Image (spheres, helix red, strand yellow):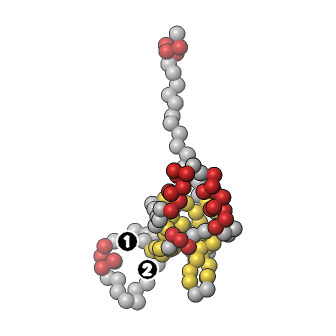
Amino acid sequence: MAKLEAAADSVGPPAGPSTALRLSQRLPSYTRSLLHIEVPVVVTLAAKKQVIGQILELGPGSIIHFDKSCDEMLDLSVGEHRIAQGEAVKVGDKFGLRVTSLILPEERFKSVAAKKASDNT
């Protein structure tokens, strides 16, 4: 899997740190300390499965081809959870990610079994 890791402290909203400050002021005091926990932030360029034999043949100058187009969005993950997509940008002489869309957590529903007619009597 081709991944680039970004420092967690480089992540921030376009409005600046004042947005995070306003958010933290609305939280109960005992939860504010959670905002200081560092978590891994990973941008995934592309991923694929490859047989071990091909991996063992890799060396300097080897090129791995991916099915993903250069124009497709990159995935942003926090921990093991994909949270956003964006496009690569240059920030000075460094790499950055412009977030273009957030990915909402999957909603989980419990199926409700229909009651039998005999249960209603």
Q: Residue furthest right?
A: 15
Q: Amino acid at mark 1?
A: Gln
Q: Earlier in the sequence, mark 2 or mark 1?
A: 1
Image coordinates for residue 54, horizontal then vertical, percent: 34, 77
Q: What distance separates the C-alpha of mark 2 from that of mark 1?
A: 10 Å
Determine whether 76 is above or below 64 in the image: above
Categorize mark 1 by other alpha carbons within 10 Å: few (<14), some (14-19), many (20+). Answer: few
Quick one: which residue is furthest to the bottom in this view?
Answer: 61
Task: Inspect this view and state whether residue 12 appears.
Answer: yes
Count neighbours of disc 2 (C-alpha within 10 A) and say few if under 14, some if 14 to 19, many if 20 or more: few
Residue 52 at x, y = what percent? 31, 73
User: In this rendering, does residue 44 appear at all?
Assistant: no
Mark linked to residue 30: none
Task: Estimate the x, y position of residue 19 in percent, counting from the top left.
Answer: 66, 62
Q: Residue at x 53, y 59 (%)?
A: 35
Residue at the location (58% across, 87% down)? 93
Q: Identify the residue at horizontal 51%, vertical 50% (top origin).
A: 30
Residue on which disc 1 sits: 50
* Dot 2 and dot 1 residues touching (CB under 8 Å): yes
* Helix, strand or loop status at disc 1: loop
SS assignment at label 2? loop
Between 78 and 33, the residue placed more toward the observer is 33
Residue type at tag 2: Ile
Q: Residue at x 30, y 76 (%)?
A: 53
Q: Quadrant of the N terminus?
A: bottom left
Residue on which the image places disc 2? 64
Furthest-front residue in this view: 29
Viewed as shown, does residue 119 lie left or right of 55?
Answer: right
Residue 65, x across and y down, in percent: 46, 78
As drawn, the residue found furthest toward the top would be 121
